[in-house]
Image (cartoon, rainbow, N blue to C red):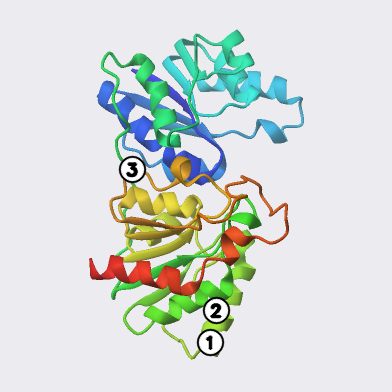
Amino acid sequence: MKILIILPNWLGDALMATPAIEHLCTLYPHARLTFVGSFVAIEAIKHHPKAEASFVDETKSQPLSRLRATHAFAKQLGQFDLAISFRSNVYATLLLFFTPAHLKIARKSWHASLLLDKAVKLSRDIHLSEQYNNLVNVVDEEPSSAPKSRLYIPKKSYAQPTLGINPGATYGSAKRWYPDKFAEVAKAFAKTHHIVIFGGPSEVDMGADIEKRLQEMGVTNYSNLAGKTTIQELCAGIGGLDVFVTNDSGPMHVAAAYGVPTVAIFGPTRHFETCQWKNEKSIIVRRDDVPCAPCMKRTCPLKHHECMTKIEAGDVIKEVKKLIEA
């Protein structure tokens, strides 16, 4: 059973698609998977034991027109028994349309309805992992709930209890809590835990800001890995943590895949749709007294950012203590 899977572009969304991928593998135990996606999505997901091939979709940057590039890319992929897209983009639909497959499935849109075999209407009032899983339920005679998230990158083993902090969020500044508050949280546990600062290439400055604050507080028991890890190293490093403090972000969903005890800070996003999926050791910190949240904006349109400024370091420290004690 050859299955083509077009992954979501964002790391977090790709992780939230892993329950649906596991569901597919349960339905088809002898499945051979081909993944297509962004660089970060492929780097995280390509280690799946049933992965036969993986491709980074570079059609957007091709010198030819993207339509022609998408057609040529489809011919490179080969033929499939089943093709499913977790992206709603018109070019993802076109890639499925151009790729020979017995059954092609995607979320309902005008282009999917026009070009594919199954265009599935999905509710946005449920978790994104369940939305993705409902695409798989189309081919399941007994539709089921999404299983847990899953990554196959071996987790890192730390020499001492370790607390990770992740101050970044690629989507936009509105999702980011503040470096000074992350530093306060780190300081509160530095005597019992080694502190690891995580972040991508665009978050080096945030990591440096927190590092400077920790130095000023006299904290030396830390490692700053912001901008210094590959996707595989990032996943492995998060997977081995004892506790994790993070914004709503891709790394938050990495932690969910490993079941890492996590305090997740939510501001402008819909926590019921994008919180950690089935991580029993997860606590959400958010303010429910900010009437404009969740606004789903990349930057605060009202300039006050109260959904984040009203969350204090003490609020997060209290929840981290609960996880450590548990």
First of labels 3, 1 by sequence position: 3
Mark 3, residue position: 150
* Picture coordinates of residue 11, whole percent (x, y): 51, 45
Q: How far apart are marks 2 and 1 (CA)?
A: 6 Å
Mark 1, residue position: 215
Amino acid type, callout 1: Gln
* Picture coordinates of residue 215, whole percent (x, y): 53, 87
Q: What element carries label 3?
A: loop
Closer to us: 270 or 131? 270
User: Which residue is at a point 73% across and 59% down the rendered structure image?
Assistant: 303
- Residue 247's label in the rendered image is none
Amino acid type, callout 2: Glu
Label 2 Cα crowd, 10 Å radius (few <14 / some 14-19 / many 20+) = many
Label 1 Cα crowd, 10 Å radius (few <14 / some 14-19 / many 20+) = few
Quarter of the image with the C terminus is bottom left
Is any atom of residue 48 visible in this view? yes
- Please report contact status of discs 2 and 1: CB closer than 8 Å, yes or no: yes
- Please report contact status of discs 2 and 3: CB closer than 8 Å, yes or no: no
Closer to us: 150 or 101? 150
* Picture coordinates of residue 8, whole percent (x, y): 52, 35
Q: What element carries label 2?
A: helix
Closer to us: 148 or 235? 148
Check the image and report above or below for 291 versus 116.
below
Is any atom of residue 176 visible in this view? no
* Picture coordinates of residue 108, whole percent (x, y): 54, 18
- Residue 211's label in the rendered image is 2
Amino acid type, callout 3: Arg
Q: Quadrant of residue 114?
A: top right
